[in-house]
Amino acid sequence: MRRLEGKRAVITGAASGIGRSSALLFAAEGARVLAVDRDLDNLRALSDRSGGAITPHLANCDVEEDIDGMVSMARDHLGGIDIAFANAGINGGAEAFLDQTVGEWEAVLRTNLIGTFRLVQQAALAMLPQRHGSIICTASVAGLRANAAGAAYSASKAGVISLVQTAASALGGTGLRINAICPGLIETGMTRTIFERAASRGTSDKIGQLNPLRRAGHPDEIAEMALFLASDSSSYVNGQALAVDGGLSSMHPTPPRKS
């Protein structure tokens, strides 16, 4: 039997990267998926590829009314929610810490943390009557350690990890679970410039060299963790921030040894 047979899922940031891989994997495992993003064309292509198991939904994950609307859409179109994957996020740019503005921080926090909070809250309210459900949030290794990303992004993802921990406590006894995934360096639209810059310099082989696996990750590898957390296989996993980073966060990064 497929691992998500009969489940109903909402996935944000679903038009590309981790969200896209997760939507396709969830659908292949039997779920009906409401795929949410600002890129309607890619969402429609995703729906076509899934044979209709994925329903596209245009929304901004930094707008409260849009978040509430996607939860209402899931109730109306899917009949409810069993899985909510708050995956949408922005990186906030690469400006030096002393050059960043309050406005830049507000934009990052509004999408990555406040938008995530609102989806967690509203999805939980939708799930409470059924006494079961899995909520998943995309955090980052940047929320665990310094120097993995810019300050605003890192702070927002540290906030997501705290949100998951506090929400798990707040939802105690309800049958709902919530966990965070902390990806390392994954090749997505958000990180494309890193890979393009390395290719132009002829240093692609050095990407990911600071983690023990000595490589970057792929969105499909994060989707597999999301599938585990969405499924009943993780029924006793709750309130956790799980790093999927090639081992980067398990150590103090050091230059690779020459063979």
Image (tube, rainbow, N blue to C red):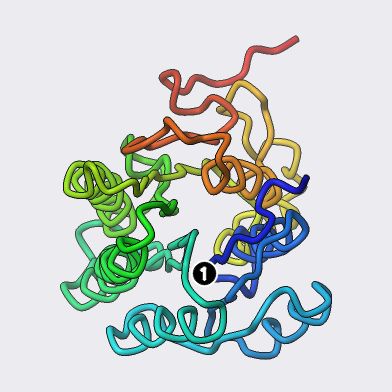
Q: Residue furthest front?
A: 130
Q: Is residue 128 left or right of residue 14?
A: left
Q: Is residue 9 above or below residue 156?
A: below
Q: Is residue 251 left or right of residue 100?
A: right
Return the residue nearer the eye: 99 or 228: 228
Q: Residues within 10 Å of mark 1 (few under 14, many from 20)?
A: many
Return the residue nearer the eye: 44 or 78: 78
Q: Is residue 241 above or below residue 138?
A: above
Q: Residue at x 52, y 43 (%)?
A: 229
Q: Residue at x 27, y 47 (%)?
A: 158
Residue 112 appears in the figure: no
The percent coordinates of residue 88 (x first, y second) are 46, 68
Q: Amino acid at mark 1?
A: Val
Q: Quadrant of the C terminus?
A: top right
- Describe the element under mark 1 as helix, strand or loop: strand
Return the residue nearer the eye: 131 or 34: 131
The percent coordinates of residue 71 (x first, y second) are 40, 78
Q: Which residue is mark 1?
A: 10
Return the residue nearer the eye: 54 or 46: 54
Looking at the rendering, which quadrant does residue 68 occupy?
bottom left
Residue 157 appears in the figure: yes
Q: Is residue 30 left or right of residue 230?
A: right
The percent coordinates of residue 60 (x first, y second) are 42, 85
The percent coordinates of residue 52 (x first, y second) are 77, 80
Q: Quadrant of the N terminus?
A: top right
Q: Please give the count of numbered marks on the rendered protein.
A: 1
